[in-house]
Amino acid sequence: MAYLLETELPNKTSIPFALKKIYGIGKFNSINLCKKLGFSKNLKISDLTVEQKNKLIKLINESKFLINSDLRRVKNTNKKKLVEIKLYRGIRRIKGFPVRGQRTRSNAKTAKKIF
């Protein structure tokens, strides 16, 4: 296991698939990162040298992706803000109901449970 950007990446997987394990980097961004660095799609994490790992970390930091704890913090503050200003979505979040307009008559039984 390679530890990269607060995430453990499996050694046997190829780089684009391993980068998807980092919270905030999806398929599109991982493929673009590999193209920019000139890595092949078949290159494994275990085959990376220290210099290549440093280049990868530097490129991710330069591209200003919100990843891991930063992204989680932003998402949580956005949810708290909805609740604080008592928006409709915030009230639904407090009550435990579906937030984005899903029906509750026949579905969302687990969301409607009151503890």
Image (cartoon, rainbow, N blue to C red):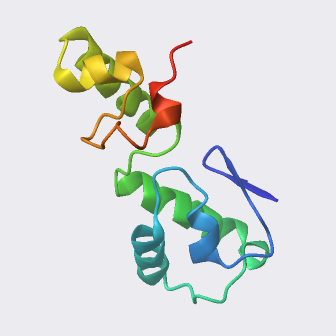
Q: Position of residue 109 (x, y in %)?
A: 49, 35
Q: Nearer the viewer, residue 28 or 57?
A: 28
Relative to 41, residue 7 above or below: above
Q: Residue at x 40, y 43 (%)?
A: 106
Q: Residue at x 53, y 50 (%)?
A: 23
Relative to 38, residue 50 above or below: above
- Name the quadrant of the C terminus: top right
Number of marks in picture: 0
Relative to 53, residue 104 above or below: above
Left or right placement of residue 57 versus residue 62 in this view: right
Q: Residue at x 82, y 59 (%)?
A: 1
Q: Position of residue 25 (x, y in %)?
A: 47, 59
Q: Position of residue 61 (x, y in %)?
A: 43, 52
Left or right placement of residue 31 versus residue 81 in this view: right
Furthest-front residue in view? 106
Q: Residue at x 34, y 50 (%)?
A: 64
Q: Nearer the viewer, residue 39 or 105?
A: 105
Q: Nearer the viewer, residue 24 or 56?
A: 24
Residue 74 is drawn in which quadrant?
top left
Q: Position of residue 6 (x, y in %)?
A: 64, 43
